[in-house]
Amino acid sequence: MSLPDFSNTSRFPAFSACPHADAPPDPDASQSHVLIGTIAENMTVSTSPTFILRDRSSTSFALTLKVPKDQVQEGVPGGGYDVSGFKKGFTVVVPGARRSGVKDGKAGFVQTPSGSVQVIPAAVEKLLAMSAQEQDRAEAIGQKGWCQGCREIDTDTTTSDSFMMLIAGARRPGVDAAGMLAHARLGSIISTRGKSDIEAKLTDQASRLPGALAAVDVPVGSKNAHSARLRCVVSRSDPAVLGGAVHVWMSRLRATL
């Protein structure tokens, strides 16, 4: 699942861009905005959980959660509402946030039902960076193939039907070899005329790798090219052997049909 485009300031505005609590709904808005803020402090002293957050522009603002009256425990900070997940450095997601108390030069604060918010275990800065990275990668990849293990992009655009399409290998419990899933490069162009030969060659290469199995799908490409897909399925049996050593290489397969 891809990340939301956090660079979209209409969808994810800064605190100061959020509408006032008494402002009428925007009829032109295609979807509700979402305010995101990193938890800086827990300032809860009453029965309403209150936090100081920092928005995407590092501006601080207060967020107060309204706990349903039938759930409030009198005399208990936060009204007994469980805020154990609201940790410093995490991001709170507030759909449709509106600013209350905006007057006399004051920026106001955000007040919202406790059940409407979500918490993400990462700071806003991290989310923005991750979103930007994903957008850059999507633009760079275009219609090309890429490896989910090593993030390498296939930049060969000579034949749209012949570039390498990489399928990530399956992760298995206990196996996380530095992002090792499936990395393509056999190191040399394999010339062959039939699917059986291609499958045999790739299966032979995969069989040389301890603890790994391979499944091959070789669709017919354009007039003079094959496009090959190799899936490396990591074995559960020996994660130590796989731990940094296993890379499955696959080249573009060009053959005269």
Image (cartoon, rainbow, N blue to C red):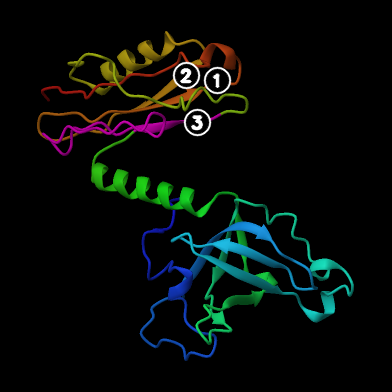
Whichever of callouts 1 and 2 sits on the residue coming sooner in the sequence is: 2
Q: Position of residue 166 (x, y in %)?
A: 33, 32
**Magenta segment:** 147-171
199 magenta-colored: no
Closer to the camera in the image, 34 or 201: 34
Magenta stretch prevailing secondary structure: loop
Q: Let me know if residue 155 is in the magenta part.
A: yes
Q: Nearer the viewer, residue 74 or 208?
A: 74
Residue type (three-letter) at the residue carrying disc 3: Ala
| Mark 1–mark 2 distance (CA, rounded to whole Å) | 7 Å
Q: Is residue 10 left or right of residue 126?
A: left
Q: Residues within 10 Å of mark 3 (few under 14, many from 20)?
A: some
Label 2 sits on a secondary structure element that is strand
Question: Disc 2 residue type?
Answer: Leu
The dot on residue 170 is 3
Q: Which residue has dot 2 on it? A: 213
> Is there a contact, CB below 8 Å, between mark 1 and mark 2?
yes
CA gap, disc 3 and disc 1: 9 Å
Report the quarter where the C terminus lies. top left
* Position of 109 relative to 233 (above/below): below
Residue 106's place in the image compared with 3, above or below, is below
Residue 146 falls in which quadrant of the image? top left
Q: Can residue 80 be seen in this snapshot?
A: no
Label 3 SS: strand
Upstream in the sequence, badge 2 or badge 3?
3
* Residue 235 as seen in the image, left or right of residue 49: left
Name the element at disc 1: loop
Q: Which residue is mark 1?
A: 235
| Residue located at (18% from left, 34% from top) | 221
Image location of residue 212, percent across then percent down: 48, 17
Name which quarter of the figure residue 41 lies in.
bottom right
